[in-house]
Image (cartoon, grey):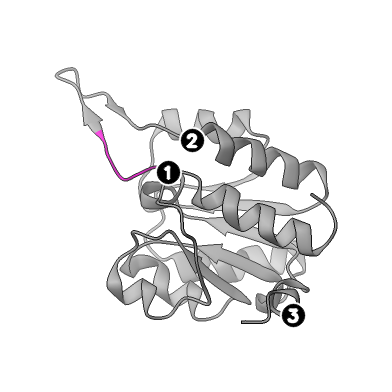
Amino acid sequence: MNKQLAFSDIKAFIFDVDGVLTDGTMLCFANGEQVRAFNIKDGFAIRHAIKKGYVIAIISGRKEEGVYKRLQSLDVQHIYLGVDNKDEVFQAFLQEQNLRPEQVAYMGDDVPDIAVMQQCGLAACPADAATDVLDICHYVSESLGGKGAVRDLIEMIMKTHSKW
């Protein structure tokens, strides 16, 4: 893949949460609380991209306050949690941000992400994504979900734009 060409139009990143920003592990406590771990390097890259003018969005099927607060702490403005139809949210996001699909890099890890990944300019996934996702991706990070895959994608694209 010619990375310079593939990454040249990217103006926005969209990420799934479970399996992308986290490793997919969920700790469940007796009181019903559910906890996930986020990678600090991924968080740095997200904030850095926002500061450099990229639009960051999160689209996830699950909805939990802890995840929302973590994303807010990273200055993410476009947070869509509890989403049943990621494609509908993707289309609305494109309209709201006046973007074309080819200007978006989307990182997902499982079947619910495929419809959006097939439309965006750059479909990416962590190394441990589901086989169906690995088969359609333009870019597979060497990093695992929740272990720097988000940082890898953001850094690579920003470096091609000389913005890192």
Q: In what element is the residue under mark 1?
A: loop
On the rendered structure, is 160 left or right of 71?
right
Q: Nearer the viewer, residue 61 or 153?
A: 153
Residue drawn at (78%, 64%), measured in percent from left and top? 160
Which residue is tagged 2?
A: 39
- The mark that comes first in sequence, 2 or 1, is 2
| Residue assigned mark 1 | 146
The residue at which mark 3 appears reads as 5
Residue type at mark 1?
A: Gly
Residue 43 against residue 122 in the figure, above or below: above
Residues in magenta, as a range: 22-26
Which residue type does callout 3 highlight? Leu
- Where does residue 5 sit, x and y in percent of width and height? 74, 80
The residue lying at 45 percent from left, 53 percent from top is 143
Q: Is residue 142 left or right of residue 10?
A: left
- Disc 2/disc 3 C-alpha distance (Å): 29 Å
Badge 3 marks a residue whose secondary structure is helix
Q: Where is 160 relative to 77, above or below?
A: below
Q: Is residue 76 visible?
A: no
Residue 16, position in %: x, y? 46, 54
